[in-house]
Amino acid sequence: MNALIIAIDGPSASGKGTIARRLAAHFDFAHLDTGLLYRAVGLAVLKSGGDPSNTADATQAARALSPKSLNAEDPGLREDSTAQAASKVAAIPEVRRALLQFQKDFAAHPPGDKKGAVLDGRDIGTVIAPGAKVKIYITASKEARIQRRFKELQERGGNVTYAAVLRDMQARDARDAKRVVAPAKPAPDAVILDTTEMTAEESYAAALKIASEVLAAD
Ligand code: C5P
């Protein structure tokens, strides 16, 4: 039987990660945060003193990565410097190629014998799982996303300014949208969910409604 795949894409601070995790828990599906793979590659390059924009440095780190043994709890993965490095390595075709099969396999054969998988990222509906049953592109206005990220970083107790969040998010969004391979964009058949005016709870409820309707129609 083909696995049921829920593809969640969207820009940074759109809320897609939380929504994807909650959908996976609701449907008892496996969940893969694909951003973590790029973050892990970016962090590995930074740790080794390399340059995330350098093809050789980034490709070597991507090929050395063992996605199955990735420690998602490593706080270094959540740093903003890591996010910036992630979007630099993510623009390199060899890096994307090195991470492709693991993601496709996860979607096609969800671990733990689950009957489905939720993957979230930037290219799930377009490249990783173009045949996904459910595709949702979660977005929000740039102002709302900056506000959310700013609040999140403040709550974490970081020394952060609104101007720095704005600058970093703009740089990352631009890099993700303009890259030649797998640019971040909605699949033509994705449902667009704009959460600008929604709370986190409302956004999740809206995504759950979309996914439930599509899965029930099967
Ligand atoms: O989603 P998250 O913010 O953790 O992703 C970090 C970076 O990884 C993104 O800015 C993007 O450049 C890259 N990414 C990607 N494709 C994905 C997931 C993330 O290019 N499927």
Image: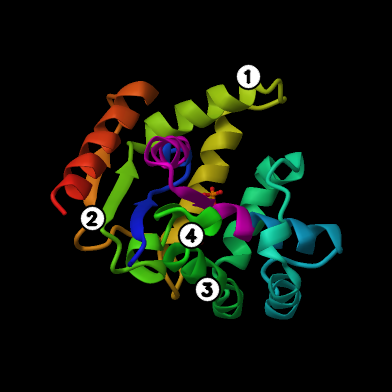
Q: Tell me the kind of residue under disc 2.
A: Ala
Q: Which residues are magenta?
A: 18-38
Asked if residue 196 shows in the view, the reply is no
Give x and y (percent) for residue 28: 43, 42
Asked if residue 58 shows in the view, the reply is yes
Give x and y (percent) for residue 196: 30, 30
Which numbered disc, 3 or 1, marks the residue closer to the eye? 3
Residue at which label 3 appears: 100
Circles 2 and 4 in contact, beta carbons < 8 Å: no
Residue at which label 4 appears: 110
Asked if disc 1 is less than 8 Å from ligand 1, the answer is no
Circles 3 and 1 in contact, beta carbons < 8 Å: no
Asked if disc 3 is less than 8 Å from ligand 1, the answer is no
* Residue in the foreground of this view, choosing between 22 and 96: 22
Q: Secondary structure at mark 3?
A: helix
Q: CA distance from mark 3 to mark 4?
A: 15 Å
The residue located at (47%, 66%) in the rendering is 109
Q: CA distance from mark 3 to mark 1?
A: 34 Å
Task: Point out the tag, 3 or 2, that comes first from the N-terminus.
Answer: 3
In this rendering, the answer to whether 1 lies above or below 202 is below
Residue at which label 1 appears: 155
Residue at which label 2 appears: 190
Task: Point out the tag, 4 or 1, that comes first from the N-terminus.
Answer: 4
In this rendering, the answer to whether 33 lies above or below 189 is above
Task: Point out the tag, 2 or 1, that comes first from the N-terminus.
Answer: 1
- Dominant SS of magenta comes to helix
